[in-house]
């Protein structure tokens, strides 16, 4: 599963760069500065948690556990829910999407906590 988490992180980082370029070049003239800033927050969290999946792959190699695997799934869910809702909110202007964004944030927090627990429980 180490290679799987590494590949997922690489793919999601590549997608983040693609979406960032789309925002910078394709959306800049179409979105208000506020909506573009919202989109860019989605990109920032998308890329940083895509990189976090490399940490999951490394930790899975060193301390394989369900906690480490859970961290990876939480990061994927967070990117999908947090960043995805901000992308859609920015592009469509659909405000209710902002109500689900915090769920993705909780996924990010849970992912980092699961990673910490996995390391501490297995480093002994």
Image: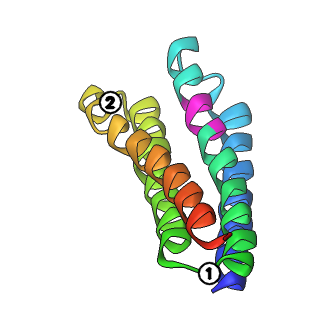
Residue 122 lies, with reference to residue 77, above or below; the image says: below
The image quadrant of residue 86 is top left
Please state if 44 lies on the left or on the right of 108 as rendered: right
| Furthest residue in direction front, as rendered | 124
Among the two numbered marks 1 and 2 on one chain, the one whose residue lies closer to the N terminus: 1
Q: Residues within 10 Å of mark 2 (few under 14, many from 20)?
A: some
Q: Which residue is mark 1?
A: 64
Pick the quarter of the image with the C terminus: bottom right
At x 72% / y 61%, what residue is drawn?
A: 55
Q: Residues within 10 Å of mark 1 (few under 14, many from 20)?
A: some
At x 73% / y 34%, what residue is drawn?
A: 25
At x 58% / y 30%, what residue is drawn?
A: 41
Residue 105 lies, with reference to residue 30, above or below; the image says: below
Please tell me which residue lies in front, 91 or 49: 49
Please tell me which residue lies in front, 100 or 40: 100
Please report contact status of discs 1 and 2: CB closer than 8 Å, yes or no: no
- Is residue 74 a member of the stretch shown in magenta? no
- Is residue 40 a member of the stretch shown in magenta? yes
Q: Which residue is mark 2?
A: 98
The magenta region covers 39-44
Instruction: Identify the main secondary structure in magenta.
Output: helix
Could you say which disc has been placed on residue 13 in the image? none
C-alpha span from label 1 to label 2: 35 Å
| Furthest residue in direction top, as rendered | 33
Q: Could you say whether the residue bearing mark 1 is in a helix, strand or loop? A: loop
At x 30% / y 35%, what residue is drawn?
A: 97
Please state if 69 lies on the left or on the right of 17 as rendered: left
């Amino acid at each position: 599963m180490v290679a799987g988490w590494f590949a997922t992180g690489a793919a999601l980082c590549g997608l983040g760069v693609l979406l960032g370029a789309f925002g910078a070049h394709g959306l800049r003239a179409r979105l208000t500065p506020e909506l573009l800033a919202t989109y860019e927050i989605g990109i920032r969290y998308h890329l940083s948690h895509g990189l976090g999946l490399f940490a999951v792959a490394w930790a899975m190699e060193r301390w394989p556990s369900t906690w480490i695997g859970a961290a990876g799934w939480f990061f994927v869910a967070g990117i999908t829910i947090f960043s995805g809702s901000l992308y859609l909110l920015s592009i469509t202007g659909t405000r209710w999407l902002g109500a689900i964004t915090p769920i993705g944030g909780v996924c990010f927090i849970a992912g980092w906590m699961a990673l910490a627990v996995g390391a501490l429980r297995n480093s002994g």
